[in-house]
Amino acid sequence: MKFPLTLMLATSLLVAVAHGQYLSSSRGMGLGAYTALVNDLSGLDWNPAGLVQVRDWELSGSNMFSSETRGLSFQTIGGTKRFLENHSFSLRYSPGLVMEFIVPSTFQFQNGQPITFDKRINYRESYAFGYGYQMTPDVALGFSGRLREEFIADTRPFIEQDTVARVRVVEYNASSWNMDIGMLWNPDPSFSMGIVAKNLFRMKESTFPQEVESYALRSLKSLRLGMSYRPSWFATFSIDFDTERQGGFGSEWSITDGLQFRQGSVFGSQYSPFVAAVSGGLGFSYESVRFDLSYLHFFNPTDRSKVTVQDFVSKGVKDIAFNQFTQSQGMLTINVPLGRTREYIARIEYVTISSEVYPSSYHVHAVRPIGKARVRNISQKPIQARVSFFVDQYMDRPTETPSLYIGPNEEREIPMYAIFNDAIRFVPSMVLRAAEVLVKASPTEEYDDRSQARLIIRGRNDWDGDAMTLRSFVTPEDPDILRFTRNVVNQQKEVLAETSGLLEKFNTASILFNEFSSRLSYVNDPRGSKDRVQYPSETFALRGGDCDDMTVAYASLLSSVGISTAFIDVIPPDRTHDAHIFLMFDTGVPASQAEVVSNNPKRYVVRKNERGEETVWLPIETTIMTDGFQKAWEVGAKEYFDHVEVGLGVVRGWVRVVDVRPMM
């Protein structure tokens, strides 16, 4: 006779043995919001873009303690490696990132024989990997993958030989890779923002059958946004919020360079109360090793421990790391750098590039700052810091600043200089290059921190509109220029031989002008604040140009035969669109004998030459070259008189006279 089987569910409580760590980081636990600040292995969960913050090799391990574990429980161990400067890769093993639920049940036969069995449900994420990429100096991207494994061991009763009650275990398993994508944006040293798409992709390897599908973890896609603000070196504030209407807020206070206190909170509309938990933490460093200790306390621990089967099935579990069953817990995390393990005493807060680089005037950056770096002394002792600047391909070696004193916890802006090589002269059009900035602080010779900045290098014919840099386009030693002036002088040597010694330069300039103008034509192209300027050889090849091109070419011709020149830069304050440039040249005639050039003092300018002697200079308007030297002189002299003598342009600052001393 077969015994009828009667199921009597003696208990409906679900016993949870949960060792899921809170968002995988002690520092993150202490802050409550870590998305925009993460800089270690915990980026695999918080924000994979933060992996790029690791300097070299770094190992990280975490232990958790709570009333459930009754002591330290080993959670995770992993490492992060930065390579090729802009890339990082991480691997993690997490034996403690596990949740186990036990559903106790009792079966009783008609004859009163009871059978007790447990349904065991186990979830774990033992393996994870991540990759981070520093796309620009301000923006980093990253992705991470976590292997989620789910196991169910279901004990079922059966009757053996019609009399003996037995049980058998039926096992189910499922696994999948859950992928996150994150971004980190640092537009300013005091502000950062992170965004993470959690569980954006899921690659299933196996799934539960339909009869136990209700026990499967629910892979929920969500978007989390985090921001941090650092108003001073000792205070940092951060906040996170996600599409599940939950988030965190916290602050970190640096008492010294190696000691920080943290406090945070976890909140959300789905919690009761709204602020569900508070946390506190401590971070300290010993040599190169960093220790972080934190504790998270929930306000309703009793509600979290009383979990029924119905609660579990209806609400489900969406995240092993943090869910409705997570209990109050503490965590200790240790980070050990294995690469550059020395103490860092200087940090680059930000880098500013103050100007674009023009190939025509690249020499100026050897003496004029190309930008500045704000450097902070993060130690408790004074340091001597120096900054180096380097652009690959266009510099042979980094340019380093002199050492500057920076007091403890102080900041200082350090100007940077650049000595470019000749390769920069041949950049055909504007390019964007990455400039590497390093800071070194005594007594070590290794760099303490590094940063990248965007550097704009203009094309070889680009000009910034400054008459000072226009001089760099003057090339009197260009073979085409020398060939032209030598031919003209040889052809006119008899005429020049009959010229008075006082007027030799005057007549030479006149002959070169007329010969030059006969071969070229002026193209009307008013310049604005920036322009394109032809080199003299290009003007000869194209047989034309605008006012800047003509002025540069004629200055090159005169300089090649030893005649000094100067640019007259006119920018009327009420008509900046009428900005204009022309030149004047030194006749070499002493001011006391100016009448040999002209009896009209409005036709010439008396000024000092390179030797400090007062000589006669003639203004020349190159835009009317086709009208000949005399007309160009007449118009140029009138323009100079109107702008300088009548309009007081030099006195008022809207007219500049710049001597041409080309850098060859």
Image (cartoon, helix red, strand yellow):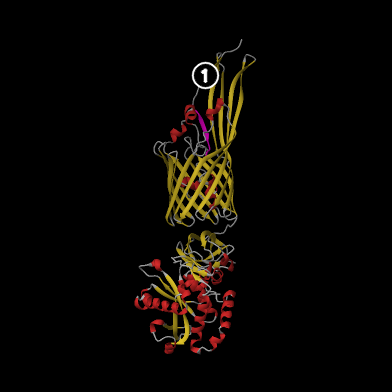
Q: Residue at coordinates 49% horizontally, 30% vertically from top-left?
A: 312
Regarding mark 1 in the picture, which secondary structure is present there? Answer: loop
The quadrant holding residue 606 is bottom left
Quarter of the C terminus within the rendering: bottom right
Residue 106 x/y as whole percent: 54, 21
Tell me, yes or no, if residue 365 can be seen here: no
Q: Which residues are magenta?
A: 13-21
Q: Is residue 67 left or right of residue 577?
A: right
- In the image, residue 617 lies in the stretch drawn in magenta: no
Question: What residue is shown with label 1?
Answer: 8
The image shows residue 196, relative to residue 109, as above or below, that is below
Residue 254, picture quadrant: bottom left
Residue at x 57% of width, y 66% of height: 426
Of 168 and 398, which appears nearest the observer? 398
Q: Residue furthest top?
A: 1
Residue 17 painted magenta: yes
The relative height of residue 604 versus residue 354 in the rendered view (above or below) is below
Task: Please provide percent x and percent y for residue 24.
Answer: 52, 43
User: In which quarter of the view is residue 168 placed?
Assistant: top right
Q: How many marks?
A: 1
Give the image location of residue 628, x and y in percent. Answer: 47, 77
